[in-house]
Amino acid sequence: MHRRSLLKGAALSALPLPALAQPARARTLRFVPQAALTALDPIVQNATISTTHGFCVFDTLYATDAKLAPHPQMASGHETSADGLLWTIRLRDGLRFHDGAPVLARDCVASLQRWCARDLFGQILAKAVAEWGAPDDRTITVRLNRPFPAFLYALAKPASVPAFIMPERLARTAPDRPVAEMIGSGPWRFLANEFVPGSRVAYARNEGYVPRDEPAQGASGGKRVNFDRLEWHIIPDGATAGAALQRGEVDWVEYPLPDLLPVLERSRDIRLQVYDPIGFLGVIRFNHLHPPFDKVEVRRAVRDCISQPDHMAAVAAPGDWWECHSLFPCTLDGVTQFPAPTRDFDRARAAIRAAGAEGAKVVVINPTDFAAVAPQGRLAADVCQRLGFEVDLQEMDWAAMLSRRNSREAADRGGWSIYPTNFPAASIANPAVNSGIRGDGPTAWFGWPTDPATEANIERWLYAPDAAAQAAAFAEVQRSAWEHVGFAPSGLFVLKTGFRSDLSGVLQGPNPYLWNLRRG
């Protein structure tokens, strides 16, 4: 029986959650995230779940609104020199870390330097920086080698490793090693003694946090916390999570199963809201280091046989998805849609034979506990099998898949060939932040492609002298990246998030923002 038919006919049931006394219940926000949190350092781990945790604990100098425009956050403002080479940023009053220490300019400099070592956009920025400075406790200076028009967006970007600020003593940790403590200056304090990896996360309101005066919008504005306590409850089974929401055992389920949305929508006690209007792009990522996907002809063959309607119907509700034959979200301006593939399997098999890859082993790693991803891995495995590959579909939980994707070994030695995921549109909104198209080899995103042509076009986009030149460079980025096939897009979709109707202030964006919320 198909999963949709089974769920439509099944009664919702849930495992009981720990009971809370009524006063404590009223002051506790209970949240069911998209996946289990296992990696706490959001600079080392770029998974969305770690970023969501990062926004609870840490803050950023700048942050984006719902339209991805940057605004001061920890910063009170900035000045730039006439030649655009010197940026001077001032910290606003009242910033303190959770251990009581004031936030100083040297903390910010150390944090930005560590972030630059990990993030792809940060690495580009670092090449343009001649000197980081902290002339006094509240002033940060950044002297550039050349003007960097996207400087503020780099510091403000809301996804794929935001530039979180932490104490200097933690920021001096080697960039590839997780920090030892979760001490930030954000609106929530992480309760380390209550953390159960893969099961439970807890936070207490940061009583010393001073929010900005303006309204919250996206990741920017006043981060006002109106609950004493925040709990994350990991419920891998979607039906169980939906039933817990119906019974009021939890306040918010980040991703209710699409099949359950009609049931939840009929409840007076539950509200549904589009998670992020600019959506998510489905991704089938190839490992470029090893056969068979080290050859572009083979990557193209798989890309051109993927059925986006099949992928999207498996992860999103009817009317909530679109075909998008691009490596950028088609909801954004300037994005090129390439011709839809013909899904000619005979032609694709011939291309694979000509490339010497017929019958090659393909290991597909796939997360069973991530409803918006798991069906895509199975569908990609089916396409590969129909193309004549020897397919090994290895299913595991999301945390295990994140760990496995680090392996650079060949598929038959513990590595992988393909894995599915989704990009929040905000995380790939321009060429510099789109990790899926970056082609700088060993430092590229998992899959490690080498694509000098696209890298050169990204450089032209970054330093374009005017809007027309930037638009032309963007078109060239898209063309060269599409030809290189860093990944295969599986469609564009929006997801709905579900929460109790007495919860107000749920913000939209690429991450769930766990502030601005009230009960009643």
Image: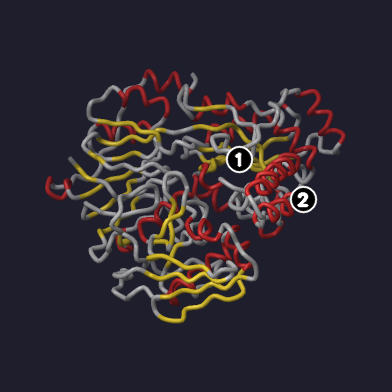
For this view, does 389 lie left or right of residue 317?
A: right
Q: Position of residue 519 (x, y in %)?
A: 20, 43
Q: Nearer the viewer, residue 132 or 314?
A: 132
Tell me, for residue 441, which label it has, or none.
Answer: none
Could you tell me if residue 113 is visible in this image?
no
Report the residue at 13% width, 47% height from top.
Answer: 21
Q: In the visual, does 311 lie left or right of 214?
A: right
Q: Which residue lies furthest to the front in this view?
A: 82
Q: In this view of the protein, which residue sits in the foreground, 365 or 447?
A: 447
Tell which residue pokes out farthest to the right in this image: 354
Q: Where is residue 168 in the image (x, y as percent from the top left)?
A: 44, 75
Q: What amino acid is found at the position of numbered circle 2 in the picture? A: Ala
Q: Position of residue 335 (x, y in %)?
A: 62, 37
Residue at the disc numbered 1: 328
484 relative to 309 in the view: left or right: right
Give the farthest residue toward the bottom: 135
Residue at 73% in and 23% down: 342
Q: How is the image coloured?
A: secondary structure
Per the image, the residue denoted by label 2 is: 453
2 or 1: tag closer to the N-terminus: 1
| Mark 1 crowd level (few <14, some 14–19, many ≥20, 10 Å Cα) | many
- SS at mark 2 in the image: helix
Q: Residue at x 49, y 37 (%)?
A: 279
Callout 1: helix, strand or loop?
Answer: loop
Which residue is drawn at the image coordinates 60% and 62% (left, top)?
A: 148
Looking at the rendered image, the quarter that the C terminus falls into is top left
Q: Where is residue 297 in the image (x, y as percent from the top left)?
A: 80, 38
> Would you say the residues marked 2 and 1 are in contact, meaning their CB atoms lie under 8 Å apart?
no
Q: Which picture quadrant has residue 206?
A: bottom left
Type of amino acid at the residue the image marks with label 1: Phe
Mark-to-mark CA distance, 2 and 1: 17 Å
Mark 2 neighbour class, 10 Å CA radius: few under 14, some 14 to 19, many 20 or more: some
